[in-house]
């Protein structure tokens, strides 16, 4: 059960304004540079701490966002809101790498009232669609190594060569820009994401799972359940969220529905 995934972020302006991590105002190198990841293995350890944990445990992320329909020569139309959780489990590969299992469950909400919706009055077709939650994930869907990140489950654009990220700092925060894509039909996608963490925690190697946040955007065709046929256009899913210490921190309404109807989506522990 693997489709994929949420989300393209317009963070380039922020990245330019803040500059490369550790850059001094006059363009000279800052003492901070020596404390940020430099080797492929340091980049690997940092991204695992940022996204999940160096320990083999469930790491849930909660997010809220809005979904737009985009058609040529028309203004983007907000069609619904979303709320979800994406949970990761990083399994040690024994060779310094990590195998990533993940589960995602998103519920949709009315764009105006914010009520959870089970039916959608489709403004493009005039039909009433049965709304289906976004559910996907699986065991070992990605492989994180010092040589790059690959996904054996989908035709993702691989990260080849020594692993390296463009870490940036702004004030008391560290962040990066990363993306991934798949050409798999029937729902190809492009996702770009900007995860961040407090700089002080990031520089403390004793913290095995960073208190992280993210902003992310996903561009893809319309969901199949909308039955859009040959109607042109695509969707833009934008969301923001953060890492939780456990699913018990999820909002009550969301957690009650997930536990009642989709309990298997609340843990990414490999089966």
Image (cartoon, helix red, strand yellow):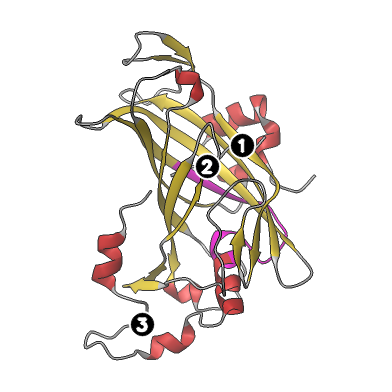
Q: Earlier in the sequence, mark 3 or mark 1?
A: 3
Q: Nearer the viewer, mark 3 or mark 1?
A: 1
Q: Is the residue marked by circle 3 packed among few (<14), some (14-19), or many (20+) residues within 10 Å?
A: many
Q: Earlier in the sequence, mark 2 or mark 3?
A: 2
Residue 77: x, y in percent?
27, 28
Q: Specify the label residue 5 is tagged with.
A: 2
Residue 269: x, y in percent?
74, 48
> Between marks 2 and 3, how big is the CA–CA gap?
32 Å
Q: Nearer the viewer, mark 2 or mark 3?
A: 2
Q: Specify the label residue 121 is tagged with.
A: none
What secondary structure is found at the residue carrying circle 1?
A: strand
Which residue is nearer to you in this view: 11 or 219? 219
Write down the quadrant of residue 262 in the picture: top right
Placement of 142 over or under 14, stated as above or below: above
The residue positioned 76% from the left and 72% from the top of the image is 95
Placement of 114 over or under 86, stated as above or below: above
Quadrant position of the N terminus in the picture: top right
Write down the quadrant of residue 177 in the picture: bottom left
Q: Is residue 226 visible?
A: yes
Which residue is nearer to you in this view: 43 or 179? 179
- Asked whether the beta carbons under mark 1 and mark 2 sit within 8 Å of each other, the answer is yes
Per the image, the residue denoted by label 3 is 22
Per the image, the residue denoted by label 1 is 136
Placement of 13 over or under 22, stated as above or below: above
The residue positioned 72% from the left and 72% from the top of the image is 96
> Between marks 1 and 2, how big is the CA–CA gap?
8 Å
Residue stretch in magenta: 48-63
Q: Is residue 268 magenta?
A: no
Residue 155: x, y in percent?
58, 47
């Amino acid at each position: 059960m693997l489709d994929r995934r949420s989300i393209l972020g317009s963070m380039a302006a922020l990245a330019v304004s803040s500059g490369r991590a550790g850059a001094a105002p006059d363009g000279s190198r800052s003492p901070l540079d020596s404390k940020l990841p430099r080797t492929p293995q340091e980049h690997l350890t940092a991204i695992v701490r940022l996204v999940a944990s160096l320990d083999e445990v469930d790491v849930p992320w909660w997010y809220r966002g809005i979904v737009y329909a985009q058609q040529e020569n028309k203004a983007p139309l907000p069609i619904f809101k979303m709320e979800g959780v994406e949970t990761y489990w990083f399994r040690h590969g024994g060779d310094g790498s990590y195998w990533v299992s993940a589960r995602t469950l998103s519920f949709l909400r009315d764009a105006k009232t914010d009520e959870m919706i089970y039916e959608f009055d489709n403004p493009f077709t005039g039909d009433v669609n049965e709304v289906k939650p976004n559910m996907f994930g699986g065991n070992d869907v990605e492989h994180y190594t010092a040589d790059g990140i690959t996904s054996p489950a989908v035709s993702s654009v691989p990260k080849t060569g020594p692993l390296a990220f463009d870490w940036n700092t702004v004030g008391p925060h560290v962040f990066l820009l990363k993306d991934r894509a798949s050409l798999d039909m029937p729902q190809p996608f492009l996702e770009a994401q900007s995860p961040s963490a407090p700089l002080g925690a990031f520089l403390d190697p004793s913290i095995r799972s960073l208190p992280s946040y993210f902003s992310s955007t996903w561009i893809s065709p319309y969901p199949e359940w909308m039955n859009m046929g040959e109607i042109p256009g695509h969707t833009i899913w934008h969301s923001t969220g953060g890492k939780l210490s456990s699913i018990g921190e999820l909002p009550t309404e969301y957690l009650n529905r997930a536990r009642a109807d989709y309990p298997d989506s609340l843990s990414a522990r490999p089966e």
